[in-house]
Image (cartoon, helix red, strand yellow):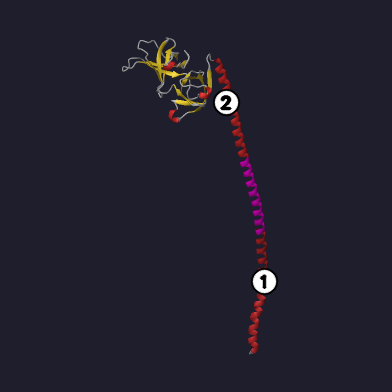
Amino acid sequence: MNLSRIRNLIVPIFALLISCWVFSRPLGAFALYIYNNTAAYLHQTVRGLKTTKKEAEALLHAEAHAEKLEKESRALKISRDSFKAQAETGKDLQRVLGIKEQFAYKTIVAGVTGRSPDSWHDQFIINKGSNDGIKIGRGVINEEGVLGQVSKVGPTSSIVQLISNPDWRMGVKIARLNQYCILNGNYPEKARLQFVTVDSEIEAGDEIVSSGVCTDNDICPYPENFPVGKVVMVGKDPNEIDLVVEVEYYADLNKTKYVFILE
């Protein structure tokens, strides 16, 4: 009885040991396979991460270098544009001084330094003032024609009232007819002539020049016969006793950079 019980215990244990021995070999091989493949994968992953890190560092370096080159390029462009602007300014000054020599009267050269959007067509600021001999009432011209008149003066700058200002009045004459009248600034419309009688022979295309006639306080802002503009329209208005005459200025007030103040 005891022997049978012992045999019943030994047989299962023996069978279990044989099973473990039989199955241990493929399980070991499988475990070794998993281990080898996992190690290889991890190795490849680590190598890949190192490569990615190097590539990322190289990319960051390239981006930093590109940004540096772009900054240098912008700086060079700014310097180039600055030199170009200075060269253009030098050429403009040379040209202006050449024009100054051609005038038969003394002038002071000044640059336009400021314009207000609220008074763009009424006035601008020049970089010369009382320290340079500028006085209120002096005429302001350029090589194309009359621009305006000095209305305010400071030590180093002045304000010029423009001929397009609706408050502007100037003695002029119709060159072909030697007929005197008054030019009235009329922005945003064309300038108009006043006191042109209905029997006048004025025509479109007639040149309007300065009259040379002095105004109040003996201020004579312009020499006689300096160009102002040309007639572009002559008409009649039943509500007006004189002709309606529109004038286009010779001087381009929007592109003026340098002016001449008459002494």
Screen quadrant of the N terminus? bottom right
Q: Nearer the viewer, residue 226 or 254?
A: 226
Element at label 1: helix
Whether residue 45 is in magenta: the answer is yes
Q: Is the residue 84 above or below the residue 224 in the image?
A: below
| Amino acid type assigned to the residue bearing label 2 in the image | Thr
**What is the magenta segment's predominant secondary structure?**
helix
User: Which residue is outermost to the left?
Assistant: 239
Bounds of the magenta span?
Answer: 42-68
Going by the image, does 27 lie left or right of 237? right
Q: Amino acid at mark 1?
A: Ser
State the residue at coordinates (64%, 46%): 61
Residue 231 visible in the displayed image:
no
Front position in the image: 210 or 205: 210
Frontmost of labels 1 and 2 is 2
- Report the residue marked by disc 2: 89
